[in-house]
Image (cartoon, helix red, strand yellow):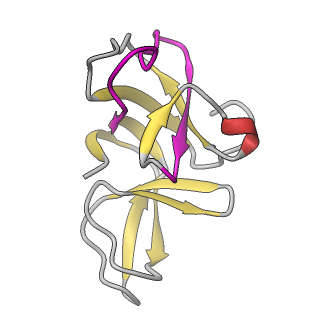
Amino acid sequence: MGAQLIRLGLRINYTAPSDIDYGDVVIQGDLVGIATRDIKSGEVGRIALAGLFGIVKDTGVSTGMTAGTKVYWDATSKFATASDGGGLNKLLGVSTRDADDGDRFVRVLMGGGISTGVPV
């Protein structure tokens, strides 16, 4: 599980190209969402595009984030990060509280699912 739903916002239907677990971060082009339940390959499920989420992050030196930091999804490592990865990582939203280096999760306010610019 890559994310824990804290408060639900906007949701859309999503047809899964492969099995997706509850809490997985879902990327479709510049659309970014969180699976609100398990979705089997080929089935239609719902993904949340807005809300407050606990998103899994890496732990260790220099992995902390302060409140108000833009948070990106690194699809290779499957972690939230403060780095845009040279444009490769997708914008999730903005952190709402500090996350220390040793914290496993960062709280992220997602604002509509679009991974470009500042979240609404």
Q: Nearer the viewer, residue 93 or 19?
A: 19
Viewer-side residue, 54 vs 119 = 54
Instruction: Look at 50% across and 37% down and name the residue there.
Output: 110
Q: Residue at x 66, y 34 (%)?
A: 84
**Percent position of residue 52, x then y:** 37, 33
Depth check, front residue: 36 or 2: 2
Which residue is drawn at the image coordinates 33% and 12% (left, top)?
A: 100
Residue drawn at point x = 74 percent, y = 41 percent: 87
Between 31 and 60, the residue placed more toward the observer is 60
Quarter holding the C terminus is top right
Residue 23 placement, left or right of 119: left
Number of dots carrying numbers: 0
Rendered location of residue 99, percent (x, y): 35, 15
Does the magenta-highlighted stretch encompass residue 97? no
Q: Residue furthest bottom?
A: 42
Q: Where is residue 61 drawn, in percent x and y?
A: 40, 15
Q: Is residue 19 left or right of residue 11?
A: left
* Magenta portion: prevailing SS class: loop
| Image vertical order of residue 65 relative to residue 107, above or below | above
Q: Please state the extent of the stretch shown in magenta in the rendering.
A: 55-76
Above/below status of 68 relative to 9: above
Q: How far across and how far down the image is residue 68, in percent?
A: 53, 13
- Position of 4 with respect to 95 (left or right) is left
